[in-house]
Amino acid sequence: MPHNHDVILLESVKVHRARLRGAFLFGQLQERRTANDNVKRVIGSMVLAAVICAGCVGGSFVMKIMADQAAAKAKANATVQILDRGFGDLA
């Protein structure tokens, strides 16, 4: 703790003003703690939900792209087999 009495006085005035400002803006201390804790929880929950949703959408997108590529590859292979059979009959 500082030995300078002026510094102690200035710090106590600073803390007092911060408490008064907080009480004026947000209400009593019990209400502020509850509100701030709940707001942090709500924001955290919303961020977590957004991350989970983004992961699901990204996974679904990747799975659809892979399925489309597999379908296109299967269609191309089927077309090649049909053409091979058709030309095989002519030869």
Image (spheres, grey):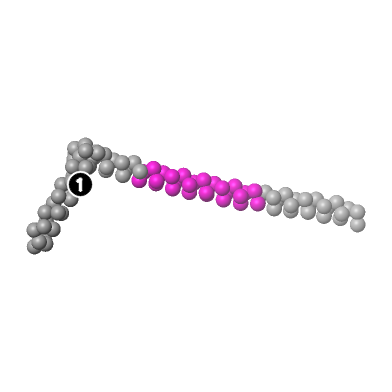
Percent coordinates x, y for residue 28 in the rendering:
19, 37
Q: Quadrant of the N terminus?
A: bottom left
Residue at 88% across, 53% down: 89
* Few, some or many residues within 10 Å of mark 1 (<14, 14–19, 20+): few
Q: Nearer the viewer, residue 30 or 87?
A: 30
Q: Magenta includes 22?
A: no
Judge from the rendering whether residue 60 lies leftward or rightward of residue 42; answer left or right: right
Residue at 85% across, 51% down: 86
Percent coordinates x, y for residue 39 in the rendering:
31, 41
Residue lying furthest front: 6
Q: Quadrant of the C terminus?
A: bottom right
Image quarter for residue 50? top left
Q: Nearer the viewer, residue 42 or 31?
A: 31
The segment highlighted magenta reads 44-69
Decide: is 9 above or below 22. below
Amino acid marked by disc 1? Ala
Residue picked out by circle 1: 18
Percent coordinates x, y for residue 8 in the rendering:
11, 56
